Amino acid sequence: MKKCLISAIIVCLIIIILSNCKKDKDIINDTSITGTVLNLCTGNGIKNIPVELIGNEVTLTTMSDSSGSFSFHNVSVHSSSEYNYQLYIESKSGIGNVGLIGDVVDIDKKSISNNYVLQVVPTFNILTVKVTPSYTFIPPDTVTLTFTQEKYHEYVPNYPYQLVVTSYGLKPGYPDSSKTHFDYFPMGLWNIKIDKTKNSVRTIIYDSIYIDYGATANYTFSF
């Protein structure tokens, strides 16, 4: 009986020892984590964007500089699988906010990079499109304005970002013009195609407008 008890104790001790051996040993290294905030609307870095480094026991915040670069120094990174780290940019929209579609990147602790890229889509506030003087469109008189953000297309080719204004949407009744508006769309350079028919004569005109991050802009055309 004693032999069986001793054998059982020995087996339990062996299991405990093996179980402890399997646990990954936690090693803490102080390191730097750096990267860039890329503006998908321009293809360049963007400044003054808050970047967070989030871990089990740490949340650090910094701002991207004039070239879009950011850095966290002397970060204590735990090697244990119980610890995870992310770089995070919060998305913002709605009243009182400058619109921004953010991003999140997981950090691989086995190969920490110093070239992380977080991709963001900053938006303008409002674009008002209007025809002046005010005009009531009666067929066959029509107009269609197509706004296209080409740079955004390069990064997100399967999402054709276009804003379309038609004569139906340009409703009269405002004091100085017929107008419509868009809000919280990608900032940057928008190419414009104006396709209009007046007195049975069709004309196509090309133009462009640059709308900055958080800006309120107006585009006016005559008919």
Image: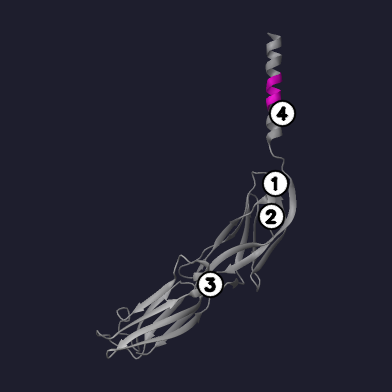
| Distance from the alpha carbon under mark 4 to that under mark 3 | 56 Å
| Dot placed on the residue nearer the N-terminal end, 2 or 3 | 3
| Residue under the image location 69 percent in, 63 percent down | 71
Mark nearer the viewer, 4 or 3 = 3
In which quarter of the view is residue 177 placed? bottom left
Q: Position of residue 95 (x, y in %)?
A: 46, 70
What's under tag 1, amino acid-wise?
A: Ser
Residue matched to label 4: 17
Whether pointer 4 and pointer 2 mark residues with C-beta atoms closer than 8 Å, the reply is: no
What's under tag 4, amino acid-wise?
A: Ile
Instruction: Left or right? Give the position of 142 relative to 93.
Output: left
Label 4: element kind:
helix
Magenta span covers which residues? 10-15
Q: Position of residue 100 (x, y in %)?
A: 52, 68
Residue matched to label 3: 41
Residue matched to label 2: 112
| Dot placed on the residue nearer the N-terminal end, 4 or 2 | 4
In which quarter of the view is residue 201 placed? bottom left
Mark nearer the viewer, 4 or 2 = 2
| Dot placed on the residue nearer the N-terminal end, 4 or 3 | 4
